[in-house]
Image (spheres, rainbow, N blue to C red):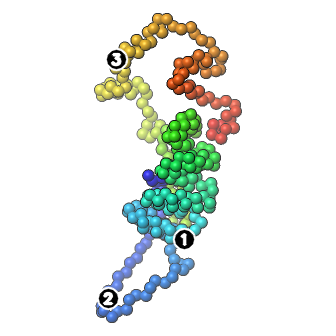
Amino acid sequence: MSALTLALVTAPLLFSACSMVRVAQDVPAPPPPAPESDASPSSGYHYSLAVLQNLSGQTDGAIRQMERAIERDPKSAFLKTELAALYMDKGDSRKAIALCEEALAEEPNAIDVHLLLGNIYLTIKDYQSAAKVFRKTIEIEPKNVTAHLFLGTIYAETKQYPSALEAFEGLIRIDPDPGARMRFLAKAPGVESFEPADLDVLFEKEPGTEPEPYERLLEGAIHGRMDLFTPASAAFETWRIVQPLLDDPPPVVPYVQGTWGPIEADRLVKGVCQWQMPWRPVEKDREHPFLGG
């Protein structure tokens, strides 16, 4: 699983090549290459080669070029993160984790590094370490949608359902609009650094609003899709169960205004599940890191 998808916009690279023709057997061999100097290729050059080789499926070559880029810029958390992703493509999670930890030593609050590290732990099913990383991510950036999504997934995978519900509810409060979020790394010509550029697409606008319930029913009826309709047998069974309650309804149980119902309601789900109280903002939530505002 590729943890991050990055698109690179790079300045054009100019390659020059020359050919030599030997005219006789006694032509001396060319001298060995001179040692690298200050004029040797930059980290950006090797990074660009690594990206190109990775796109062509040459993972080993991409790793070598990325390592050369790091040799020229050993404190770059970004380059170490990219190399970690390459090692994950090869299935070497140990090296990938070590590189992420090195990157975090350089930039402890780098969100992209935390997300990649958490994804690596998820890939090797180390859910405890993954949850720790994603909680740290949320601590740094409380409204990070990706971290909340993965944390809720971990809780669900490990059968911690109340915690999973809490995480997913928090996710909906942070980002109630369905959509897609992509991040590109853009590089301007002649500049070594890379700047993130975000692209957000709201499904409400693209490709359009979701159809209303009755619109979906009508469309299903027109096209003969019956999955949205209750079969007659289910309708008759429902009436069989409900009719005695309609004929002899139980007494109405009062409850205090402003609460979510009487204690007697718990009997309906006893031994099966428990009620999940609806979220409603209250005064104390105003200062909450992601409920407030």
Q: CA distance from mark 2 to mark 3?
A: 89 Å
* Residue 239 lies in quadrant: top left
The image shows residue 182 at horizontal and vertical percentages of: 49, 49
Q: Which residue is mark 2?
A: 22
Q: CA distance from mark 1 to mark 2?
A: 36 Å
Q: Earlier in the sequence, mark 3 or mark 1?
A: 1
Q: Is residue 207 left or right of residue 257?
A: left
Residue at the location (44% across, 40% down)?
206
Residue type, mark 1 in image: Glu
**Quadrant assignment for the C terminus:** top right
Q: Would residue 192 be visible to someone looking at this image?
A: yes
Q: Tag 2, which secondary structure?
A: loop
Q: Earlier in the sequence, mark 1 or mark 2?
A: 2
Residue type, mark 3 in image: Ser
Q: Which residue is farthest front?
A: 271
Crowdedness of circle 2 by 10 Å Cα count: few (<14), some, many (20+)? few
Q: CA distance from mark 3 to mark 1?
A: 71 Å
Which mark is in front, 2 or 3? 3
Residue at the location (33% across, 94% down)?
26
Badge number at residue 71: 1
The image shows residue 132 at horizontal and vertical percentages of: 59, 48
Badge number at residue 233: 3
